[in-house]
Image (tube, grey):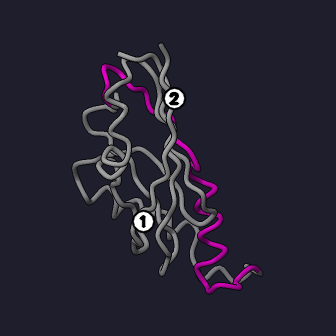
Amino acid sequence: MNVMLQKSLKLRPYSSGYHLVTDQILEAIPEISQIQTGFLQVFIQHTSAALTINENADPAVRRDFQTFVNELIPETYPRFIHIDEGSDDMPAHIKASFFDTSLQIPISGGKLNLGIWQGIYLCEFRTQASGRSLILTAFGAAK
């Protein structure tokens, strides 16, 4: 028998940066425990934030991500035209395109099959963002 389910998750507002949200995702969709083998797709419904998977232990990794990406795509770039919502508007769109809008993670034995040092990040590129909306879709063979 196959299992397919979908849920929405509204994250609280975060400041600009890279934030681990793995636990919030797992709390929002505990039904993955019913799936023996399958996938969880996580999709973000925004154009100025993104998702990625990376180091989940050392917070310095998240700070280094922010430092590097902000230097690569600075808010002070003088040729941006789309600045309707502030100086971080167009840089946020470009940064989001460098990352993912969706992730697909294996489910094995009812659990996400992430590597030991992997976590799911919300990549927040706006200085003052509202809460972000995620769509979580789990599918696979039932236990």
Q: Which residues are magenta?
A: 82-111
Residue 99: numbered disc: none
Residue located at (50% from left, 70% from top): 70
Count of all numbered marks drawn on residues in the image: 2
Residue located at (33% from left, 52% from top): 24
User: Would you place residue 114 above or below residue 10 in this image?
Assistant: above
Secondary-structure class at tag 2: strand
Q: Which residue is mark 2?
A: 4
Kind of residue at disc 2: Met
Earlier in the chain: of badge 2 and badge 1, it is 2
Residue 66: numbered disc: 1
User: Would you place residue 35 above or below residue 22 in this image?
Assistant: above
Q: Nearer the viewer, residue 79 or 46?
A: 46
Decide if residue 27 is on the left or right side of residue 90. left
Which label lies toward us, 2 or 1? 2
- Across and down, in percent, residue 123 comes to 46, 60
Q: Does 59 lie within the magenta span? A: no
Residue located at (22% from left, 49% from top): 57
User: Would you place residue 136 above or below residue 48 in this image?
Assistant: above
Kind of residue at disc 1: Gln
Question: Badge 1 local density, few (<14 within 10 Å), some, or many (20+)?
Answer: some
Where residue 73 sits, quadrant-wise, is bottom right
User: Would you place residue 52 above or below residue 2 in this image?
Assistant: below
Q: Does 110 lie within the magenta span? A: yes
Secondary-structure class at tag 1: helix
